[in-house]
Image (tube, rainbow, N blue to C red):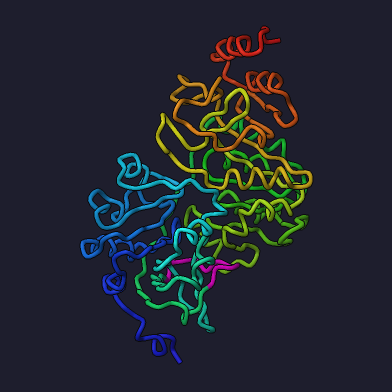
Amino acid sequence: MNWKDRFSGRLLSADEAVRQIRSGETISIAHVGSEPYALVDALARNADALTDVDMHFMLSLRKEEPHIAKGMEKHLRFFGYFLGGSTRGAVAESRAEYLPCFFHLYPRMLRERGGVDVLLISVSEPDAHGYCSMGPGIDHLPAFRDSAKLVIAQMNRNLPRVMGDSFIHLRDIDIIVEEDRPMPTLAPPTITEVEQKIGEYCASLVQDGDTIQLGIGGIPDAVVTFLKDKKDLGLHTEMAADGIIDLIETGVINNKKKTLHRGKSIATFAAGTQRLYDFLDNNPCFELHGVEHVNNPYVIAQNDNMVSINSAIQVDLMGQVNAEVVKGMQFSGVGGQVDFIRGATMSKGGRAIIALPSTAAGGKISKIVPFIDHGAVVTTPRTEIDYVVTEYGIAKLWGRSLKERARELISIAHPDFRPMLAEEYEKRFGRPLD
């Protein structure tokens, strides 16, 4: 029997679907490549009929989101766990709220806030057994696909069918909205000379047989260019981007030496160009799993020789890392940085790397600072920092005293700011910098 014959009573338009949402309910929305655009656009169109709806959402690949636009806060209260271009303005204007949380605890926090009434997701067309993939952005979805009171899915034939714990059966979807839309894409960044040098230093800390975690942006992409001569790498990462494709296709990443999920590249979401989505489609070498598993530090630590590479906004002379606040305003979020740094630190033979340019604002601001800015936060404490890398070299902080840390960090700061940092060193420790 054709699935449409069996489930015809569940087929609605996007507007009809969101009209099933009631005031006072909590909605959680799939994000990044799995964001159900038809549903969130319909939600915005029908928001006037709703009040006191809590809406939990993370990262969008669109520059603007209609359900978070000005005026929506009267109907939809947005709670974000990681901010991007479409959401940070709403938080800055107090039209929305930021919830600080380690990414692997995101589902737990949602449960402790009362759970999810409505889950809005994207799905692929079903296979012969009735199973649909939830696409390239699943993170918290496995935690709520069975417990949400109402599951509304946008069925999109363009959604890649990604392997792993990413499937949901048609019988577990309450409402199906058929609407095909192009996949949202993220253009590869242009890699600067500074990022190229940082990538080279980071790659020098990666050894054959290591399992790596990479993010997205110029620095991770630069790291990839210097990993092409490595052998038998594994991949266990929060996010997968285009950079992994060549490494997998050339066999640099083959996951043969992994001590967990051997033979498989593991992530909790993916975002990039259409090439990435085509690569992930029905590819058994790559799996997505829920964030409670992928980002759990105790799971990460089961990978021997785990290497995490993350970025930051500031690092102070004690090694404290601010990765989320700029000029006192919430810019991004905790995300999975602490999850992976902690997991890599606990891993047998593991290494955790913070990589950042030495300056910002065209060289006017040092990112190695005496103190974290007033109004900023410590995302990762000094006790968990292993390596810090800039275009001027590698600072080893793990096992170092406060004086030794300060000396290491000053040595990789931009030369224009080293005198100021050396002066601070002398004030703090009562002796000139060696």
Is residue 164 part of the magenta span, yes or no?
yes
Residue at image x 27%, y 50%? 69
Q: How many marks?
A: 0
Q: Is residue 390 left or right of residue 75?
A: right
Is residue 43 part of the magenta span, yes or no?
no
Question: Can you see residue 240?
Answer: no
Q: Is residue 407 left or right of residue 189?
A: right
Task: Name above or below for residue 290 compared with residue 207.
Answer: below
Residue 243: x, y in percent? Answer: 58, 48
Task: Give the quadrant of the C terminus.
Answer: top right
Q: Is residue 31 left or right of residue 40?
A: right
Residue 35: x, y in percent? Answer: 41, 60
Residue 411: x, y in percent? Answer: 65, 19
Task: Name above or below for residue 330 compared with residue 248.
Answer: above
Q: Main secondary structure of the magenta part?
A: loop
Extreme bottom residue here?
A: 1
Question: Can you see residue 12?
Answer: yes
Front residue of 381/236: it is 381
Front residue of 102/393: it is 102
Residue at image x 66%, y 44%? 342
Residue 211: x, y in percent? Answer: 71, 50
Front residue of 428/169: it is 428
- Bounds of the magenta segment: 157-167
The quadrant holding residue 419 is: top right
